Image (cartoon, rainbow, N blue to C red):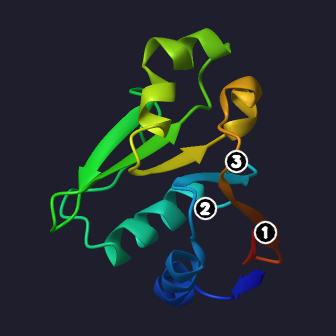
Amino acid sequence: MTLNCDHIDDLPSVARHIIKWLGGPKVVLVDGEMGAGKTTLISAICREMDVVDEVSSPTFSLVNEYHNVKGDSIFHFDLYRIKDESEALDIGIEEYFDSNQFCFVEWPDRIPSLLPLKFSRVDIKVDDGKRIFSLS
């Protein structure tokens, strides 16, 4: 499935479509070039999931935990700065993936051998200032 976003005002609609599309796997890999809008998309998805916390990039902490109005946890990973997979193991990434809570992972290519067998994937491409979201 592919979704197009011509303007930032379209992002809430895109986020709602992605949430409806998300099926079984709660680990969601969000990939795209630097500046493609990974954190912006995750923020929009969290708003649509009724997250009550401020959503921001976990660039330095590697993981942020947010809560929705029901009290469910949602985890947001930014793995851009890790040097090797051992850093992800040190924060207990496998336990997060096994938590049955939504885990949104930016820069998943940094931990190829740690990814669960089942996951959802959102690839973001930028074309002439517009975003194209490919869901798989």
Instruction: Tell me whether circle 1 and circle 2 mark residues in contact (CB < 8 Å).
Output: yes
Residue annotated with mark 1: 126
Q: Is residue 17 above or below residue 47?
A: below
The amino acid at mark 1 is Val
Horizontal side of 126 relative to 75 (left or right) equals right
Q: Is residue 126 above or below residue 60?
A: below
Q: Position of residue 52 (x, y in %)?
A: 18, 64
Q: Secondary structure at mark 3?
A: loop
Q: Looking at this view, is 49 or 31 the one in front?
A: 49
Q: Secondary structure at mark 2?
A: loop
What residue do we see at 15% from left, 68% from top?
Answer: 69
The tag on residue 79 is none
Q: CA distance from mark 3 to mark 1?
A: 10 Å
How crowded pointer 1 is (Cα within 10 Å; few <14, some 14-19, many 20+) is rated as some
Work out which quarter of the rendered image holds the N terminus and state it. bottom right
Residue annotated with mark 3: 34
Q: Residue furthest right?
A: 127
What residue do we see at 76% from left, 51% from top?
Answer: 33
What residue do we see at 33% from left, 72% from top?
Answer: 49
Q: Is residue 122 above or below residue 48?
A: above
Horizontal side of 66 relative to 92 (left or right) equals left
Residue annotated with mark 2: 37
For residue 95, which quarter of the picture? Answer: top left
Q: CA distance from mark 3 to mark 2?
A: 8 Å
The amino acid at mark 2 is Gly
Q: CA distance from mark 1 to mark 2?
A: 9 Å
Q: Looking at this view, is 28 or 133 the one in front?
A: 28
Q: Secondary structure at mark 1?
A: strand
Q: Looking at this view, is 64 or 6 the one in front?
A: 64
